[in-house]
Image (tube, rainbow, N blue to C red):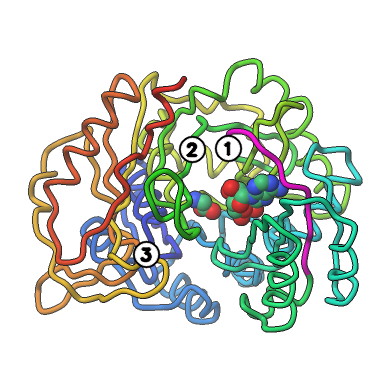
Amino acid sequence: MKVLIVGGGGREHAIAMSVKKSSKVSKLYCAPGNAGIAQIAECEPIGVMEFDKLVAFAKEKEIDLTIVGPDDPLAAGAVDAFEAAGLRVFGPRKNAAILEGSKAFSKDLMKKYGIPTAAYENFDDPEKALAYLETASFPIVLKADGLALGKGVLICQTKEEAIEGVKSIMQDKKFGSAGNRMVIEEFMTGREVSVLSFVDGKTIRIMSSAQDHKRAGDGDTGLNTGGMGTFSPSPFYTKEIDEICHKEIFQKTVDAMRSEGREFKGIIFFGLMLTKDGPKVLEYNARFGDPEAQVVLPRMKNDIIDVIDACIDGTLDKIDVTFEDNAAVCVVLASDGYPVSYQKGYPITGFEAFDGKDDYFCFHAGTAEKDGQIVTNGGRVLGITALGDTLKKAREKAYEATEWISFENKYMRHDIGKAIDQA
Ligand code: AMP
Ligand code: GLY
């Protein structure tokens, strides 16, 4: 079969690598892709929001299955556009992608169906939000309602900071129209875990757990980023916690979406916090995590096409999704200055060191080809993943492999997976 992947980041490179392994796939396309994906797929320079062009391309190439990677096209109805053209596509429709697309929606859903999450209030009037802060306790968390590249969350230690935060989100529109509404919620403490799952509308199959490192600097300092590195599995996500999540969170979420007439087919990514009162939902995403996909997918035993087909056809109850009994660590190589401002266009060398090594992966995120050379083309440039028998071994190997790659303003965190030492 012929498969098209929509997207062009590290996550899509990881998805492409998994799809490429399937014996069912004869031809792989990606739009727009990147320089790494181009080594295993034919890339077409169509943007992820150009639905008409994407659909026309899928028709022209007689694509059998399209997989939509990023949040923006999902929230804007990419899946609906493909379905309307009679094309087979994997991902939630617009009315279900709202689970990620609106934090106010997802908070209301959790409240209505008794899914554990932080206490909160929604606001669409900045004056009311400011008045609420007068009696609130601090620290407190402010969230822009809409999609904001994973950056629309402010943790405010004091009332003064929170007042500034409300103004910047709702009045100065720091995150654009994502800030027309906002959620103000209770600050929770605990360990964070990402749990990704496949969903067919009724049945949910959980993938192996992972943990991201969102802050730019070592020791969780600096600004929030899209994610600086991940490991999988999380030793903090125990069997006991898994049982609670299955009972209190996972199936309840799928059932809630169905009850709302928003049947969810695709990936639900549960951002969880393991608090002293049990696991609670920090946020939902309606797609694979980036860079969670880069540590979870290389460990999956199933043919990804079988699982995706089962999601689309509503037969996920017929299959098990299983993972290798090993571990993976991904260290992001970024451009120094990310997430604020950084230079692009520097030549990258050292890729050949990965050739022929099954347990090392060099996922491209922000790269491009220029005059026959691969150059940096974004904040997050590469995701270096290594597999190992243990998390410690995987971490050692991933950091070893970060040394194989060179480019001018290479930046990384040096403590990805350090938390596992406390497990
Ligand atoms: P989100 O995009 O909702 O995952 O938020 C980004 C990050 O902000 C999360 O990964 C947490 O580290 C932090 N965060 C979000 N909500 C809360 C909360 N209610 N309490 C504490 N930290 C939070
Ligand atoms: N790594 C977090 C995300 O994909 O949202």
N-terminal of the two: label 2 or label 3? 3
Instruction: From the viewer's side, name the closer residue of 2 and 316.
Output: 316
| Spatial separation of the CA atoms under disc 2 and disc 1 | 7 Å
For disc 1, does the CB lie below 8 Å from ligand 1? yes
Which residue is disc 1 drawn over?
Answer: 192
Whether residue 105 is visible here, answered yes or no, is yes
Instruction: Give the magenta part as a residue range.
Output: 182-193
Q: Is residue 164 above or below residue 270?
A: below
Res. 211 mark? 2
Crowding around mark 1 (Cα neighbors within 10 Å: few <14, some 14 to 19, many 20+) is many
Q: Secondary structure at mark 2?
A: strand
Q: Would you say residue 188 sits in the magenta stretch?
A: yes
Instruction: From the viewer's side, name the closer residue of 401 and 277.
Output: 277
Q: Secondary structure at mark 3?
A: strand
Marks 2,1: beta carbons within 8 A: yes
What residue lies at 70% left-to-right and 62% top-to-bottom? Answer: 143
Q: Amino acid at mark 3?
A: Cys
Which residue is disc 3 drawn over?
Answer: 30
Q: Is residue 346 above or below residue 404?
A: below
| Spatial separation of the CA atoms under disc 2 and disc 3 | 27 Å
Residue at the bottom extreme?
172
For disc 3, does the CB lie below 8 Å from ligand 2? no
N-terminal of the two: label 2 or label 1? 1
